[in-house]
Structures are given as C-alpha cells and as structure tokens.
Image (spheres, helix red, strand yellow):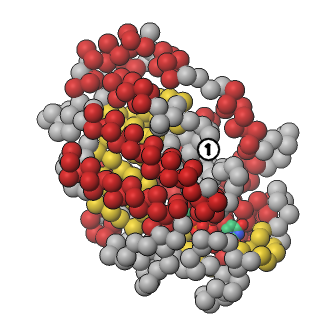
C-alpha cells in the first residue's frame, strides 16, 4: 500500500520537487516537524487556513494527536531516516518548519545529553534528508535563550550570543549549522528567535498543554483555577523593579503570523535570515500575576522560592528587523490579551464541565499513545492523498 501511494506521488511529480518552483505552480505541502505540540499545532491550523497542506511529523511525546486540526499526521521520530525518506518521497514538500525540540531550560542543565542529542543530532538528520530531496527552505524555531544574560536591552539581532544553558547552546549550534548548510547546499533558513511564547488560539480550539508544565502563564492560571495549590515564584532578588524576572511575552498567534510571512518570503526567493520575535515590552512575574488576578476576578495563591538555575533576569526583544523585512505586525501584543486567551483555554479545556472525570493532560497523552500508528499505517490510511494535488 505504501509503495502504491509512493508510486502515485511519483507519477504526479511528487518527487520532482526542486527549490525553484516551476512557474505557475503553487507550492503547498509544508512539512511541520513537531506540529502536534504547542506552537506547531497553532501553526498547522494557520497554514491550513492560509491554503497550505500541512504534513505533520510528530512522535507525540509532547504533542497531542487531538491538537492536530488539519493535514496529514505521521506519528514518527525525526531521528528515523526511513520515515523522513518516505515522507519526502510521498509528498511534494515545498518547505519545512521545525518545531521539534526539547524546551526546558532547567531540564537541559540536568540532562544536557538529551538536549544535544535531540535538538542538534536529530536536526542534522532532518537537514540531511532535506538536502537529499532538494527541499531547501527551512523555518527554524530558535530562541531568546541563545543570548544568555543580555549586555543591553532590548535585544536586537546584533546582540552577542552567549547562552547560559544547554538548551540555548543547542539552538545556537543549529543556527550555526544552518549557515554551513546554506554555504554547502544552498539551503535557505529563517531562524525565528521566540522570546516568551504564550497565549492560546483566540478561537479557543488550541492552547498550551505541556506535561509537565513549566511555563509561567499556564502555571499561574492553574493556580487561579485551583488545579494547583499555588504559584511558586522563582527568585525575588533580581535587579529588576520588583525583584522578579522580566520577560517579553509574545502571543502564539503572532508567532504563527511571523512563520507565515517567513514562509512566503522563502517561497518568493528571500535569503536566509534571523529574527528576534517579541513585543518589546517587559513584564515581571508580579505584573503577570496581577494581570491574571484582574481577569479571573480573585487573588492567586503564591509562594516564594529561590532562583531557578539558568534564568536571566531580563529578556526583552527588539523586533524592528522582523517588522521591517517580514512586515510582521503583532496583533495580540498586549499582555492582558495574551493572558485572556490563555485563561479561556484553561477554563474551556480543563474545567470540570470540559473534563467530567479528573483527567489530566498526561492521561490524554496516554490515550494518544494507545492510538499510535506506524508511519506505514498512516500513509496507507491516507487514501485521500491524491485529492490534495
Ligand atoms: N517562573 C516562576 N514560577 C514558575 C515558572 C516560571 O517564577 O512556576 C518564572 C521563571 O523563573 C522565569 C519566568 O517565570 O523567570 C518565565 O519562565 P518560563 O518558564 O515561563 O519561561 P522561560 O523564560 O524560562 O523560558 C521561555 C521558553 C524557553 C526560552 C525562553 C527564552 O520556555 O524555551 O523563554 O526567553 F528559551
């Protein structure tokens, strides 16, 4: 069955994809690696709405099947060379978006090998597969963590990169590798350095659902809704106005807009680039708690704890370059809107009515696991492939 589908694809010109699209053809299939995760799943929805055909590769360790609202989901590992071969042969991929990485700063300090193996090692496999199949456009999810402790604020693209944790190093190494892949193979990549991704789908269908959750806004809202006894504030002795860390929160929907603009730029022939994505506004942990308290209409329990290892005191982006070159205009830059959408998600997705039994996200993921299929199964089931052409 898999062979038959691949033959069909070949006959339709599926493997003839080159980096220069033929005049009059519209490149539509976008491989979204990590497309079942938080930002990836919002991107899949956005791509489909913009008329693209997302092909999602995700191992569902962090991602959830239910978060993939469109496209072809292939459950598999980025490290699986055979899986990548099959995907690139079966679909005429125009560009790749790479969201699949481990993302926890603290964990990266405790288990650096895990971060270097996945975030760097497995990315090399993806890049090699792209080169083999002449798919030479990539949008890479990078991070403000490449900068380490800022030497000036706001942080623009000229700021020196000096990560203070393995997570940040892993992202920086990939950025450096991409420059080499461009020199050697002409692979064009746009690296998007997210500051603090937050918020949720304004239509309420998607949101943040990490397991375990380590990010500030969902944890504040879990404390607000009673799913957690209190928020722990890591460090109140930083050199910031109220002593707590200051971050630049950027709405997941605005990040998706930036990816779409980057994709359009690459498809139109733009060269490689790196952009810092944030709103240019810094909010302390106390500011975010107060915003959430106003929204939910009551106080949120909190307790103080020592600093968390690997946390810079302040991270604020200068996104002038993305605005100028990509014409990126964040639509949900205001912290109240970011927290409001996250709160809607928290209430709708995790409320007692939405989840009558005490089902936690981890249990949903186990459900996903039970439904896990092989790559061959998934491709075999995709008998609607031909319709996508
Ligand atoms: N924080 C708390 N209590 C918590 C969780 C977080 O006080 O329970 C604090 C953190 O110590 C930090 C701030 O809230 O000062 C924000 O923490 P997050 O974990 O939400 O986000 P980070 O700034 O650590 O990291 C995020 C992404 C990283 C990325 C980084 C770049 O998760 O992938 O932004 O800015 F590298």
Q: In this image, 377 relative to 324: left or right?
A: right
Q: In which quarter of the image is residue 287?
A: bottom right
Q: In this view, does 177 lie to the left or right of 142?
A: left
Residue closest to the far front: 113
Q: What residue sits right under mark 1 in the picture?
A: 62
Residue 96 appears at what percent x and percent y? 36, 42
- In the rendered image, which quarter contains the N terminus? top left
- Quadrant of the picture in which ligand 1 is shown: bottom right
Measuring 49% from the left and 64% from the top, which residue is drawn there?
A: 168
Picture residue at 62% right of the left edge, 40% below the top? 61
Note whether ligand 1 is within 8 Å of mark 1: no
Q: Is residue 336 visible?
A: no
Residue 263 image point, x, y percent: 32, 49
Q: Residue at point 52% right, 57% down?
A: 252
Where is residue 59 drawn, in percent x and y? 56, 36
Q: Which of 151 and 323 is in front in this view?
A: 151
- Label 1 residue SS: loop
Quadrant of the image for the C terminus?
A: top left
The quarter holding residue 154 reads bottom left
In the figure, 231 relative to 175: above or below? Answer: below
Q: Position of residue 277 (x, y in %)?
A: 42, 66
Q: Is residue 197 left or right of residue 66?
A: left
- Compared with residue 92, is residue 350 higher up or lower down, i.e. above or below? below
Horizontal side of residue 276 vs 34, given as left or right: left
Instruction: Determine crowd level at label 1: few under 14, some 14-19, many 20+ residues with C-alpha closer than 10 A.
Output: some
Residue 285 versus residue 230 in the image, above or below? below
């Amino acid at each position: 069955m898999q062979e038959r589908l691949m033959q069909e694809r070949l006959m339709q010109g599926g493997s003839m994809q080159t980096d220069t699209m033929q005049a009059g053809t519209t490149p539509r299939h976008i491989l979204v690696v990590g497309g079942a995760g938080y930002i990836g799943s919002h991107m899949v929805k956005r791509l489909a709405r913009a008329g693209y055909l997302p092909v999602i590769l995700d191992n569902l360790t962090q991602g959830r099947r239910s978060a993939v609202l469109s496209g072809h989901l292939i459950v598999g590992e980025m490290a699986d060379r055979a899986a990548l071969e099959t995907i690139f042969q079966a679909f005429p991929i125009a560009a790749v978006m790479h969201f699949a990485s481990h993302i926890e700063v603290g964990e990266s300090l405790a288990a650096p090998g895990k971060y270097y193996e996945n975030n760097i090692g497995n990315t090399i496999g993806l890049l090699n597969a792209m080169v083999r199949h002449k798919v030479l456009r990539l949008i890479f999810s990078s991070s403000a963590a490449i900068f380490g402790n800022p030497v000036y604020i706001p942080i623009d693209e000229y700021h020196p990169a000096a990560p203070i944790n393995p997570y940040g190093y892993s992202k920086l190494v990939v950025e450096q590798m991409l420059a080499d892949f461009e020199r050697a193979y002409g692979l064009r990549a746009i690296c998007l350095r997210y500051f603090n991704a937050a918020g949720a789908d304004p239509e309420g269908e998607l949101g943040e659902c990490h397991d375990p959750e380590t990010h500030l806004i969902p944890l504040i809202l879990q404390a607000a809704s009673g799913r957690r006894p209190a928020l722990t504030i890591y460090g109140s002795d930083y050199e910031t106005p109220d002593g707590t860390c200051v971050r630049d929160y950027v709405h997941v929907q605005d990040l998706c807009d930036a990816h779409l603009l980057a994709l359009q730029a690459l498809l139109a022939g733009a060269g490689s680039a790196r952009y810092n994505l944030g709103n240019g506004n810094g909010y302390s942990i106390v500011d975010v708690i107060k915003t959430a308290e106003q929204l939910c209409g009551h106080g949120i329990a909190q307790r103080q704890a020592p600093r968390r290892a690997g946390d810079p005191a302040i991270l604020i982006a200068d996104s002038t370059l993305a605005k100028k070159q990509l014409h990126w205009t964040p639509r949900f830059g205001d912290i109240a809107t970011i927290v409001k959408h996250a709160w809607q998600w928290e209430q709708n997705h995790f409320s007692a009515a939405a989840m009558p039994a005490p089902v936690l996200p981890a249990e949903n993921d186990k459900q996903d696991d039970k439904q896990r299929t092989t790559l061959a199964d998934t491709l075999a089931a995709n008998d609607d492939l031909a319709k996508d052409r």
